[in-house]
Image (tube, rainbow, N blue to C red):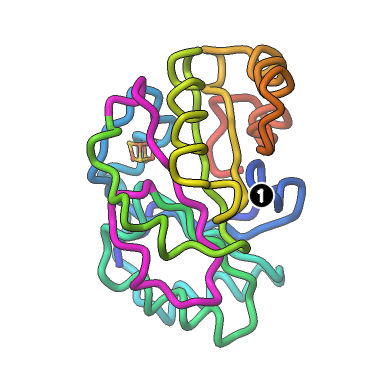
Amino acid sequence: MVINEIFTSIQGETSFAGLPFVFVRLTGCNMRCGYCDTQYAYEEGIEMSISSIIDKVDSFGLKSVCVTGGEPLANSNTPMLIQELLNKNYTVLVETNGSYDVSILPNEAIKIMDLKCPDSGMSKMMHWENISYLTKKDEIKFVLSSRKDYEWARSMIVKHHLADVANVLMSAVFGIIQPSLIASWILEDRLNVRLQLQLHKYIWGHETRGV
Ligand code: SF4
């Protein structure tokens, strides 16, 4: 598998925000979101076997692993890597952009799935059938750049009953839209979603890599 980086950090997003995690970032992505903050993962990386990835993860002595990218499901070996991590009793989060079939993932993996908003330029790439494979332990994430994105996300939440399917997250594109604005819209609409900040960017700054 081509791996961009393996590192420890505080989980900055999801309901697990604030907890220490090992991050395994795979190289390669089939999307090009306008706000992408991991462009360095499009091509940079080194070949590693699954066993050497597991050895590296083990060396950190943590309990939780986030498999991310790039887009981890662009690599057909990812489900096998995740199964190996689960076999070793890690809590495993998988961050996916929502364009690949998530039903190939082991059930115990916690799926953090994007629904790409219009301003990302990637909405048309969504694999909408994925919603039927999510459960209450999984999380659906909307990354918002504008009021237009918020209204689109709100309409998708209603249309697909997303609050009954999984935990729903909303986050602001860093430096583009104020989280306080999104907070006021959520409260105004009484939306049952979790507003999340990218905690790691507040701790270490938005341009720091590998933290
Ligand atoms: S899906 Fe993620 S990694 Fe891929 S372009 Fe979009 S933000 Fe970047």
- Amino acid type at image mark 1: Ser
Q: Residue at x 52, y 22 (%)?
A: 173
Q: Residue at x 57, y 68 (%)?
A: 92
Q: Residue at x 41, y 40 (%)?
A: 115
Q: Is 113 covered by the magenta stretch?
A: yes
**What quarter of the picture does the C terminus occupy?**
top right
Q: Is residue 203 left or right of residue 74?
A: right
Classify residue 93 by image quadrant. bottom right
Q: How many neighbours does mark 1 have within 10 angstroms: few (below 14), some (14-19), or many (20 or more)?
A: some
Q: Secondary structure at mark 1?
A: strand
Position above or below: 91 against 87? above
Q: Magenta stretch: give its range.
A: 97-121
- Residue 42 image point, x, y percent: 28, 42
Position above or below: 87 against 194? below
Classify residue 168 by image quadrant. top right
Q: Is the residue marked 1 within 8 Å of ligand 1, measured from its CB?
A: no
Position above or below: 147 against 79? above
Position above or below: 178 against 106? above
- Residue 94 image point, x, y percent: 49, 60
The one of 144 and 95 positioned closer to us in this rendering: 144
Residue 5 can be seen in this image: no
- Residue 27 image point, x, y percent: 32, 52
Q: Which residue is mark 1?
A: 9
How many marks the image carries: the answer is 1
Q: Is residue 2 left or right of residue 158?
A: left
Q: Residue at x 48, y 83 (%)?
A: 84
- Residue 179 image point, x, y percent: 66, 19
Q: Quarter of the picture for ligand 1? A: top left
**What quarter of the picture does the N terminus occupy?**
bottom left
The one of 121 and 12 positioned closer to us in this rendering: 121
Q: Is residue 67 left or right of residue 104?
A: right
